[in-house]
Image (cartoon, grey):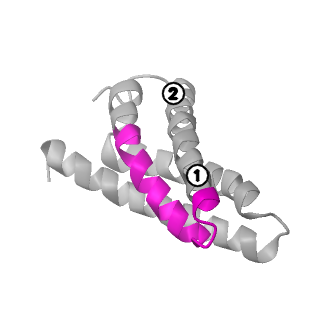
Amino acid sequence: MGGIVGRLFRFALAGGIGFAADAAALWLLLATTPLGALAARVLSIGFALCVSWQINRNMTFAPSSRGIAQEGARYGSVGIATSIVNYLVYCALLFALPALPPLAALAIASIVAMTLSFVGYSRLVFDR
């Protein structure tokens, strides 16, 4: 699958894997540590960001023309910015709807941040 449709499909697939990594890390942290839902999510976001960079780099966009350190810094910057949006939506949902399960809030917040991520990664990191 080529072109923008293929790239969007691969990005969605990479996002799904990143989401699974995020959800698994969040579940594991909640089940095995004294961390609450908010602190555990900070750590799960970091893990998912590392996983998704490698997938997007190798499957969705291809390595950029920059060195790996500069690419990583740019990816991290975009990832942190969109993760802040993701985290704020997650927190807002949990505060507004206290009965909402944290994994449901994670799913909704991740969908909101996905569009911002694609634009940022394609324009600012991978030159596409």
Q: Which mark is residue 116?
A: none
Residue 86 at least partly seen: yes
Q: Residue at x 34, y 50 (%)?
A: 59
Q: Could you say where residue 76 lies in the image, as x and y percent from the top left?
A: 56, 35
Residue 50 at least partly seen: no
Which residue matches tag 1? Answer: 92
Q: Could you say where residue 36 lies in the image, as x and y percent from the top left?
A: 77, 64
Q: Is residue 127 magenta?
A: no
The N terminus: image quadrant: bottom left
Q: Is 72 in front, or is 121? A: 121
Q: Could you say where residue 10 lies in the image, as x and y percent from the top left?
A: 29, 54
Q: Is 64 in front, or is 85? A: 85
Q: Residues within 10 Å of mark 2 (few under 14, many from 20)?
A: some
Q: Looking at the image, is mark 2 or mark 1 earlier in the sequence?
A: 2
Q: Could you say where residue 35 lies in the image, as x and y percent from the top left?
A: 81, 64
Q: Are marks 2 and 1 in contact (CB under 8 Å)?
A: no
Q: Is 61 in front, or is 32? A: 32
User: Which residues, given as a range, are shown in magenta?
Assistant: 94-118
Relative to 7, residue 31 above or below: below
Q: Residue at x 52, y 38 (%)?
A: 79
Which residue matches tag 2? Answer: 74
Q: Residues within 10 Å of mark 1 (few under 14, many from 20)?
A: some
For label 1, the SS is: helix
Question: Tag 2: residue type?
Answer: Arg
Q: Is residue 95 magenta?
A: yes
Q: Is 40 in front, or is 126? A: 40
Question: Tag 1: residue type?
Answer: Ala
Give the number of callouts.
2
Instruction: Judge from the rendering whether residue 71 lies leftward or rightward of residue 117; answer left or right.
Output: right
